Amino acid sequence: MRRAKHLIQIEGRSILSRAAGALLGSSAEEVVVVLAPGDREGVSALGALELRGVRVVFAESPDEGRAASVRAGVRATAPGAAGLLIALADQPFLEAADFDALIRAFGAGAGGIVHAAYAGERGTPVLFAARYREELLALRGREGGRVVILRHPGEVCAVALDPARGRDLDRPEDLLVSRSMQRTLSIIKPDAIAAGKLGGILQHIEDAGLRIVAMRMLHLTPERAQEFYAVHRERPFYQGLVAFMSSGPVVVSVLEGPDAIAHYRTVMGATNPEEAEAGTIRKLYATDVERNACHGSDGPETAEEEIAFFF
Ligand code: UDP
Ligand code: MG
């Protein structure tokens, strides 16, 4: 199944979580995220943001179009709110300061409807005064806030925002600009193979949106392990690491995807499993800081060298 757009990752974070995080950092009093009914992946993409106050509601009818989302969001906000700011998950580069610029203009009485403008063109987010609540709740089908804006031309005020930060991911070319395709080297280490976790880890990698484009099982000699980890030659853990890496078979693979290098490091989690985030490969499968289940390249140059080392 195609991965839903709001779960697309940029620098290891879903665009949904980026947008909700920026709103949470703004002066907005409450942040409500509207998801399609039953979108559990969307809920988990928000992760800790929910604990920090982001509220999740579900649109009533997923097939209706955007009006159902607007209505669900408006209905979920406190009745006493002075205004309703409507933002989209697919503008992942907007920052808290951008939302604050709209809120400030609204607070200063610029107009009953304050919208972002990019190089003179109207865009989102849009902030509606509370008096438009009923009109927003009356939207149907594919209608969006635009319908309400067009009805009240005298009330509308534009706040210019940086077009680079406001760009959305509606067009495939936007995605290419923001997420460069990369390849990275992965090693499933001897501890994980011995524990029968190879299949689970490969599944985890694929579920994270990384494509396995080459793969081999092999047994590193101590000399090859020394060579692979030569950058750590002077480190106290080097001898132990070499002995461990040559203690049993490993599976080396090349992973491909948008921002694959940083993305795979996020998917793996911190080197020390005690510090790794919940749900990461190392948290789930590693034993300790040495026997930590997997390796991933740490930058474009090392990725190139490490792929050439094995393939
Ligand atoms: N390692 C270790 N002790 C340490 C740090 C690292 O045994 O204190 C091992 C561990 O297996 C780690 C590898 O050495 O994956 C390479 O270390 P690095 O700091 O490059 O971590 P990584 O890039 O793998 O997260
Ligand atoms: Mg490393």
Image (cartoon, rainbow, N blue to C red):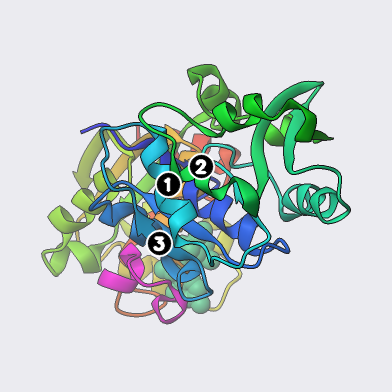
Whole-angstrom CA distance, mark 2 to mark 3, is: 19 Å
Identify the residue position indicated by label 3 in the image: 56
Which mark, residue 71?
1
Mark 1 Cα shell of 10 Å, populated few (<14), some (14-19), many (≥20): many
- Amino acid on which the number 3 mark rests in the picture: Val
Is 277 a magenta residue?
A: yes
- Please tell me which of labels 3 and 1 falls first in the chain: 3
**At 35% across and 31% down in the image, what residue appears?**
65
Mark 2 Cα shell of 10 Å, populated few (<14), some (14-19), many (≥20): many
**Marks 3,1: beta carbons within 8 A:** no
Q: Position of residue 206 (x, y in %)?
A: 25, 43
The residue lying furthest to the left in this view is 196
**Marks 2,1: beta carbons within 8 A:** yes
**At 39% across and 74% down in the image, what residue appears?**
290
Identify the residue position indicated by label 2 in the image: 136
In the picture, residue 214 is in which quadrant? top left
Tell me: residue 307, above or below residue 190.
above
- Amino acid on which the number 1 mark rests in the picture: Arg
Q: Which residues are magenta?
A: 272-285
Mark 1 secondary-structure assignment: helix
- Please tell me which of labels 2 and 1 falls first in the chain: 1
Mark 3 Cα shell of 10 Å, populated few (<14), some (14-19), many (≥20): some
Q: Nearer the viewer, residue 284 or 153?
A: 153
The N terminus appears in which quarter of the rendering?
top left
Residue 239 seen by the camera: no
Which mark, residue 259?
none
**Marks 2,3: beta carbons within 8 A:** no
